Amino acid sequence: MTGCVYLVGSGPGNPELLTVKARRLIEESDVVLHDTLPGPEILDSIPETKREDVGKRAGGEWTPQEYTNRRLVELAEEGKTVVRLKGGDPFVFGRGGEEAEHLAEHGIDVEYVPGVTSAIAGPGVAGIPVTHRDHASSVSFVTGHEDPTKDESAIDWAALAATGGTIVVLMGVGKLPMYTDELVSAGMAPETPVALVERATWPNQRVALGTLGTIVDVRDERGIEPPAVTVIGDVAATRAEVAEFLRNDAESEETET
Ligand code: SAH
């Protein structure tokens, strides 16, 4: 009997934000294939005997996607119940779509189990609603790290600048200077509020605030590193208004520039 693969979202990292279904499937599974994004608290709660790390290998190299695909098929063909655990939601910049297609090509049953995405919850736990009746009636989710083999950027930053809505960039710590420049060149005010939310919902969550003009310096001064989400737009100023009453990040450090 061929097993089944569950593509499961872990949420942003706090174990209480795992869904009830994700928790049950992790418990019932034979193997959990994961990378580091679910975060230490969730990963440490899974018995080591059934964990397989397909994230960064010793030496800093990423496990090739082909290996992960092959391993998923192999385990399912052995009749195992497999949880492919991904940070946030499996279908938001997580290659979940590619893995589902690969499994389907090999005749293996797949079930998608949604997770709380960092694209919405990351800003949220910092006190920033991605939409707000007074500030933003649309939101765009963008990757800051495109396939380096692509010649041209698939992201039209000028068009995004023109929407007037919130822009949330994932995998966008390294390329921050590039896209903040592009947005300002496209006519967005350098004073536009920007927030970086690092390790959202992890015990060492940090929030850094700035503007399109200052956020690169803020990033460097604070040493903000991935995983972090960048929130661009007037909603990012909401944090300042609610911070005093915000219970999500009692522990988190903050700087404003
Ligand atoms: N599927 C994931 C995103 C995978 S891409 C999701 O839905 O959240 C990886 C990027 O997600 C990171 O570079 C970062 O931008 C973001 N990310 C994931 N978890 C995060 C967290 N706890 N805090 C801040 N950003 C996070």
Image: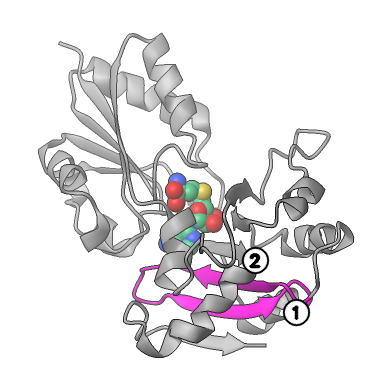
Is residue 56 visible in the rendered structure shown here?
Answer: no
Q: Is residue 201 magenta?
A: yes
Residue at 66% from the left image edge and 48% from the top image edge: 145
Label drawn at residue 233? 2
The residue segment tinted magenta is: 191-214
Label drawn at residue 257? none
**Quick one: 52 or 159, which is closer to the camera?**
159
Q: How is the image coloured?
A: one colour
Residue 213 point in image, percent of width and height? 79, 75
Label 1: element kind: loop
Tag 1 or tag 2, which sits nearer the N-term? 1
Residue 13 point in image, percent of width and height? 34, 60
Q: How many badges with numbers are in the image?
A: 2
6 on left or right of 146? left
Given the image, on which type of amino acid does mark 2 rest? Gly
57 on left or right of 30? right
Label 2: element kind: loop
Mark 1 lies on residue:
214
Image position of 104 with respect to 185: above or below: above
Q: Is residue 234 magenta?
A: no
Residue 197 point in image, percent of width and height? 51, 70
Residue 64 point in image, percent of width and height? 53, 34
Q: Quadrant of residue 21?
A: top left
**Quick one: 65 or 253, which is closer to the camera?**
253
